[in-house]
Image: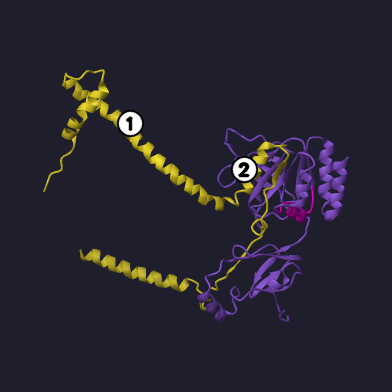
Amino acid sequence: MAAERGVAAEALVGQVVLPGDLLLLPAHYSEDAEGERLRLSAGAAPQARLLCGPGLRRSGAGLLVTKCGLLRHRPAGGGAYWVDSQQKRYVPVKGDHVIGIVTIKAGDVFRLDVGGSEPASLSYLAFEGATKRNRPNVQVGDLVYGQFVVANKDMEPEMVCIDSSGKSSGMGVIGQDGFLFKVSLGLIRKLLAPKCEIIQELSQLYPFELVLGMNGRIWVKAKTIQQTLIIVNILEACEYMTAEQRKQALAKLSGN
Amino acid sequence: FMQRGLDSQTKKQLEEEEKKIISEEHWYLDVPDLKEKESCIIEERSFLRCEDLVYGRMSFKGFNPEVEKLMIQMNSKCKEEEVEEDDKMEADVSDEEMARRYETLVGTIGKKFLRKRDQRVLKDDDEDEDDEVEEGNSNTRPSKRAKKMFLKPQD
């Protein structure tokens, strides 16, 4: 009931925030101080819109935190705030690239298990170069790398394996062999960060191929089964290892 | 005539009555219009737009060359916006070459169409040989062209 006094968003960047915290935004974003806003907008150019990312909701004077985690900020492109949280359960989000497992082939539509609450649907025409006569070669149990085109809480998620220009750009059925395993979503985002150390160190070991899905699934393929399993074990364990422990482990491997 | 006028008048009256009835039935809010606050905040559920994430398919040490090509392509898409300016510079140079080639193209295609007409003219003049069509064309072209060109009527 008592109105919580919010804290300025900039002060908490990089710190742990809990659900229920209210973050106040700088003056030229807030809607309360209209007088100030007029003054500022007369002087400064109209600001680009602020992006309120996952874990935050817009509420009146500022942003309300809905997930616990670290608050991150990106100043470029109008600014963006989001909460870097950790979870294992994936919730489909539009535009995410995920790995799905084909469970049912029902006429014109495949049902894929993506780790969410519902199986996603994938039409057979959503592959590059697919026509009614030229059907893609997809069997039950295949792994498919695609992106969500519809993903909200009211509808069944839909996936496609082509991008907006009609090209597959790497999406589609993932080849034979290899190993699929599941990790937490935070690790995936860490691995997908530009210049990730883990990936760079691993790439020095052996030639291998890697597909990362935003739903927590990773598919690895190397020349021998042993190498594949080594990479799998490192990726699973590196979430809880410090950088030094990881380097030690890799040094042992490259030594052997 | 008057009947039509009467009909249109009655029609108008009927329409007005209908409108009144309909507008009374239409629900509207008595609440004064809220000022639309300009919201400068967009809500986004995807991490892709917040963080700068790399493409999900990767291959190392030449395990899958197609995927390695893809990696370079997708990861440089972010930087392509900066490279576009350089591409435009190159395009300007090739535009000049394009213009030069186009001139000759138009000439060669133009010859194709001129030949047939000039052949007809050549058959009338028995002086030129049928084999040397091109030379005949070049000789008779200026004279034929002068005759064939449309003369604008001078006011």
Give the x, y percent position of residue A205: 80, 42
Give the x, y percent position of residue A1: 73, 80
Q: Which residue is mark 2?
A: A169
Which region is colored magenta? A182-193
Q: Is residue A250 visible?
A: yes
> Within the magenta stretch, is there residue A185?
yes
Q: Is residue A67 visible?
A: no
Give the x, y percent position of residue A255: 87, 41
In the rendered view, would you say A149 is above or below A54?
above
Image hue for chain A: purple
Lateral position of residue B69 relative to residue B25, left or right: right
> Within the magenta stretch, is there residue A186?
yes
- The chain displayed yellow equals B
Q: Quadrant of residue B49?
A: bottom right
Mark 1 neighbour class, 10 Å CA radius: few under 14, some 14 to 19, many 20 or more: few
Q: Amino acid at mark 1?
A: Thr
State whether discs 1 and 2 lie on one chain. no
Q: Residue at x 62, y 63 (%)?
A: A76
Q: Residue at x 24, y 63 (%)?
A: B4
Q: Which residue is mark 1?
A: B108
Tell me which chain the residue with mark 2 is part of.
A
Image quadrant in which the C terminus of chain A is located: top right
Q: Which element carries disc 1, helix, strand or loop? A: helix
